[in-house]
Image (cartoon, helix red, strand yellow):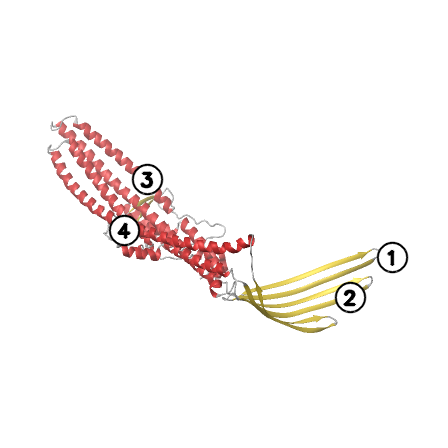
Amino acid sequence: MKDIRLSIAGLLIFLVFCTPLPLLSQENTASPEPEFPSVLELSLTEAIHLALRQNRTIESAYLSRILERFSLGQDMTRFSPNLEISPQASTKTTGTARDYASDGPDTARSRTDSSGLSLVSTVTQKIPTGGEIIFAWENGFESRYHKEDGSSGERQSGLSQWSVGFRQPLLKDGGLDYNTAPLRRAAMQEENNIRSLRDTLISTISGVIQDYRTLLSLYQDMEVQKDALAKAKEQLEVTKTMIETGRRAPNEILQSEANLARQELAFEEARAQMDDAHLALLQRLEISGNTTLIPTEKITYKPIEPDFEECLTLALERDNSYLSALTSLEMAKMGLSDAENQRLWNLDLEGGYKDGWNHRNNDPSYRQEDWWLGLSLKIPLPLYGDQKYSREMPLLSARIQLRKANMQLLTARESLENNVRNAVRQVASSLRRVELASKTRQFSEENFLVSELQFKLGRISNADFIREQDKLRDDRLAEIRAIMTYQNSLTRLDALLATTLDTWNIAFVTERADLEAEYLGGKTWMLHR
């Protein structure tokens, strides 16, 4: 039966991991929960992949990526041409009635009907120096019919013209640095967003690893407690036999019974802790509580001694908090440059050309050309009052933000260095504790075998043998917990260095095409690639 159960569980895991992700319908955005067997045996790798496949936190992060990439796509079109077509149609009827006094003429009435059609096409192109080029093409037609006191007349006119104009700021709002700064900010923000997504994945994986190992260690605790309980029962039977043969005092049965009760209590406490850990892992994996998870990993360890300098170098290259502080510093520098630019005079070079035909019914048509070229200068001189404060505040704020960004960067580096140093120290310390706990457990097992033989020969007391039993149990549990502490210290170091995905050979994908297609359909081209 166990082999059949393993085969079914393995087949289900294979199907869950290998089936392509379904596209979600717009009517029902919730992913259907996969069905699992009542008993599911999982390795740690399988648990990680299962969490990556159906985790709501991760899916929410990928949904946010759609908005982030859409916003980035908009930012990156700053120097792309903007095409706008504006068709317009209008119709209007107006009427007038004029009543005179009794000695005046009769009432005068008039009516005017007008209608028009126009189409304006505009192409606007911004350039990195801050300039702007505008090309416009306009075609229009208007008809006007007027009737007053028996007389009427109709007039039609049309316009077809094109124009091109440009404006180049020479001081304020001008320059490559100022006008390309939004693109650099957008690129920096995108790097922050990608690292945040990576950290979400790492956090999820680390949580699964911690919960899985907790359950695994408690499963092993249960085995140790079960073995201790079996030894207590055996010791009770041996004590009864020795009392019956007169080799032990009758009151020693109380010690054996009390020992059995303690072992039963410890076993039940271990079972309760295992149930709590089991529920925590089910919640982490978003699996129904009707499924029983059985961890299949073996509790082993591989000695690893990370080098502090290598870890620090890696952390400085990958840690999101430190790199975000670096980004904030660069943005603060750009903010100061922008504030200084906005204090310059407004000096603009402007020019343009317009050519068009005017058509009028019953009147001669004519062509008109216009051109212009010039400079405009505006000098702001706020001396006092609100305008003075408004002029000085941006520069003051930018300078303070730059100082704060420098301090935050120093704090981030110091914090990262301390965290890496502490994480490396914890790995070394926990590895040493594993080695000591392993030696202690080995000595305890050897000592227990000797004590067991001495107890059966009547050379040690019942209480002494019970103490040896408890010591063996405690040393076994201590070794399990020491190994788990060591492995978890490596996991925390992995997360700190942002190398968790590399450790578990997980490809980092920055977007999900299925979610993009669901929410954008044929407009996925608007996302930045």
Amino acid type of the residue that numbered disc 3 sits on in the rendered structure:
Asp
Residue contact between numbered discs 1 and 4, judged by CB atoms under 8 Å: no
Query: Is any atom of residue 257 visible in this view?
Result: yes
Looking at the picture, tell me which residue is in the foreground, 298 or 438: 438
Q: What residue did someone put label 4 on?
A: 424
On the image, the x and y values in percent for residue 108 come to 82, 58
Q: Nearer the viewer, residue 401 or 71?
A: 401
Within 10 angstroms of label 1, few (less than 14), some, or many (20 or more) residues?
few
Give the alpha-carbon distance from disc 3 to disc 1, as whole Å: 105 Å
Q: Which residue is identified by label 3?
A: 275
Up the image or down, 380 lies above or below 357; here it is above
Of circles 2 and 3, the one toward us is 2
Identify the residue shown where x is 84% and y is 57%. 107
Q: Real-space Cα distance between discs 2 and 3?
A: 95 Å
- CA gap, disc 1 and disc 2: 26 Å
Res. 156 image quadrant: bottom right
Which element is circle 4 on?
Answer: helix
Mark 3 element type: helix
Q: Amino acid at mark 4?
A: Val
- Quote the CA–CA distance across marks 4 and 2: 95 Å
Structural crowding at the residue carrying mark 2, measured as other residues with C-alpha within 10 Å and reported as few (<14), some (14–19) or many (≥20): few
- The mark lying in front, picked from 4 and 3, is 4
Q: State the residue in front, 125 or 287.
A: 125
Q: Amino acid at mark 2?
A: Gly
The disc, 1 or 2, on the residue closer to the chain's N-terminal end is 1
- Could you tell me if residue 527 is visible in this image? no
Q: Which mark is residue 104?
A: 1
Q: Earlier in the sequence, mark 4 or mark 2?
A: 2
Question: Cα distance, mark 4 to mark 3?
Answer: 32 Å
Q: Quadrant of the N terminus?
A: top left
Q: Residues within 10 Å of mark 3 (few under 14, many from 20)?
A: some
